[in-house]
Amino acid sequence: MLMQKTLVQLMLAVLFTHEMDAITQSEWRLLYVLRSLGDDPGRWWFVAMHIPLFWALIALTHHASDLVQRVSRRGLAMFCIIHAVLHWRLADDPLSTFSSPLSWGLILGAAALGAAYLGIEVQDARSRKN
């Protein structure tokens, strides 16, 4: 249980740091709704939208209910993997500037942590069956 909690905390830390990097990479230009706003309002909305998003991620993954924790942590882990696939698919887009080792380390690092978390969950489920 401690390993899963640690992986979730690391996943959040890496994902949040990726979002800091995403500001420097003007990631809102890749998002269909925000790209139409222009740089200043797009950046403003991109940053502002992360306040409730980060709050929800922290609140749900550390909720008092074990069920809410479990579901939200699995969801976060799956999101981190899907997020990396989306970045991979957008890598050739001229609006994507995520090309540095730092950017890819954060993107793939969050995905690896998500995969590790899900792997431990599967392993735990198997051991509970036996």
Image (cartoon, grey):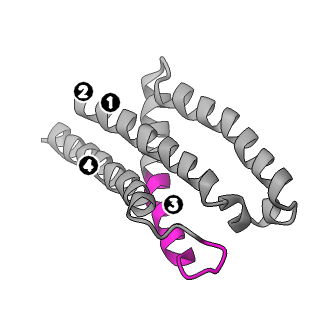
Q: Which residue is mark 3?
A: 83
Instruction: Sort mark 1 into few (<14), some (14-19) or many (20+) by Cα contacts within 10 Å.
Output: some
Does the stretch in magenta take in 100?
Answer: no
User: Which residue was labeled with disc 2?
Assistant: 2
Query: Which residue carries the number 1 mark?
Result: 5
For the residues bearing labels 1 and 2, Cβ distance under 8 angstroms? yes
What number is the disc on residue 91? none
Badge 1 amino acid: Lys
Q: Residues within 10 Å of mark 3 (few under 14, many from 20)?
A: some
- In the displayed structure image, the side of residue 31 where residue 88 appears, left or right: left
Dot placed on the residue nearer the N-terminal end, 3 or 1: 1
Quadrant assignment, res 128:
top left
Q: Nearer the viewer, mark 3 or mark 2?
A: 3
Residue with the mark numbered 4: 122
Front residue of 24 and 29: 24
Asked whether 101 or 3 is in front, the reply is: 101
Which image quarter is the C terminus in?
Answer: top left
- Range of magenta residues: 78-96
What secondary structure is the stretch in magenta mostly built from? helix
Q: Position of residue 122 (x, y in %)?
A: 26, 48
> What is the C-alpha distance between the residues marked 4 and 1?
15 Å
> The N terminus is located in which quarter?
top left
Give the side of residue 106 with respect to residue 122, left or right.
right
| Residue 69, position as x, y percentages in the image | 45, 30
Q: Secondary structure at mark 3?
A: helix
Q: Which circle's residue, 3 or 2, is located before the other in the chain? A: 2
Determine whether, in the image, residue 43 is placed left or right of residue 12. right
Element assignment for label 2 = helix
Q: Give the vertical position of 48 relative to 81 (above or below).
A: above
